[in-house]
Amino acid sequence: MGESKEVDYYHGVYGYIEDPTANKLLVVKKTKGAYKGKFDLPGGGQQAGETREDTLRREIREETGADLVEGNDYFISRATTEWTDDDQNPRTLVHTFEIARAVVGAADESVTSSDTDGCCYMAKIAMNPRNASPLVLEALGHFDAVDPDIAEKDA
């Protein structure tokens, strides 16, 4: 019989944080889990008793050092990712995520957390399946993040 895969179900709240003057997106560098080695949106799991705004505020602060000014225009989506854990066990992540368009204060690129190694603003056009989590790609599609001037030049 085939090897059985561990299936993990996860729900989190994340922020889509733009630097519109430079057409960039604030991302964190993942060091663990299914998105290890990829850019991801700042955010994470809800703790007992938290509203989604509480979670968004806490997670953005923990992963970027920035204070949430505003979070709105939430959308919910789901992605399934096949991956291999550090012990070489095959796993499946079924990830349900709520993503809000967020406005924050200044981010500190040197802040690290239990599963991230800093944050940075990356060009939206540079995000792709090889270097970005499904959350980043879904958010870019949802918030119509392609700069029309760049898209027009590529046409």
Image: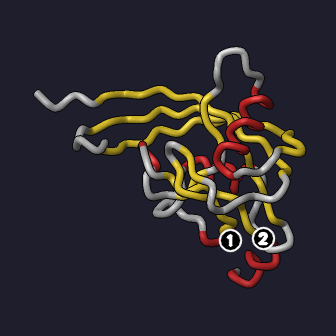
* Residue occupied by mark 1: 123
Quadrant of residue 93 in the image?
top left
Q: Position of residue 106 (x, y in %)?
A: 81, 59
Task: Tell which residue pokes out farthest to the top in this image.
Answer: 49
Q: Image height check: is 47 above or below 109? A: above
Q: Position of residue 4 (x, y in %)?
A: 22, 28
| Residue found at x 43% / y 46% | 32
Q: CA distance from mark 1 to mark 2?
A: 6 Å
Which quadrant holds residue 153?
bottom right
Quarter of image, res 120: bottom right
Q: On screen, 109 above or below 13?
A: below
Q: Residue at x 60, y 30 (%)?
A: 45
| Whether residue 152 is visible | yes
Q: Residue furthest left?
A: 1
Q: Which residue does the image show at 64% across and 22% down from the upper left?
A: 47
Q: Mark 1–mark 2 contact, CB under 8 Å?
A: yes
Query: Residue flagged by tag 2: what amino acid is it?
Result: Asn
From the top left corner, tell me how far across and down residue 127 is, in percent. Answer: 59, 65
For residue 25, above or below residue 85 = below
Q: Which residue is mark 2?
A: 23
Viewer can see residue 137: no
**Mark 1 nearby-residue class (10 Å; few <14, some 14–19, many ≥20):** some
User: What secondary structure is marked by label 2?
Assistant: loop
x, y percent for residue 65: 72, 51
Q: Depth check: 47 or 25 in front?
A: 47
116 relative position to 8: left or right: right
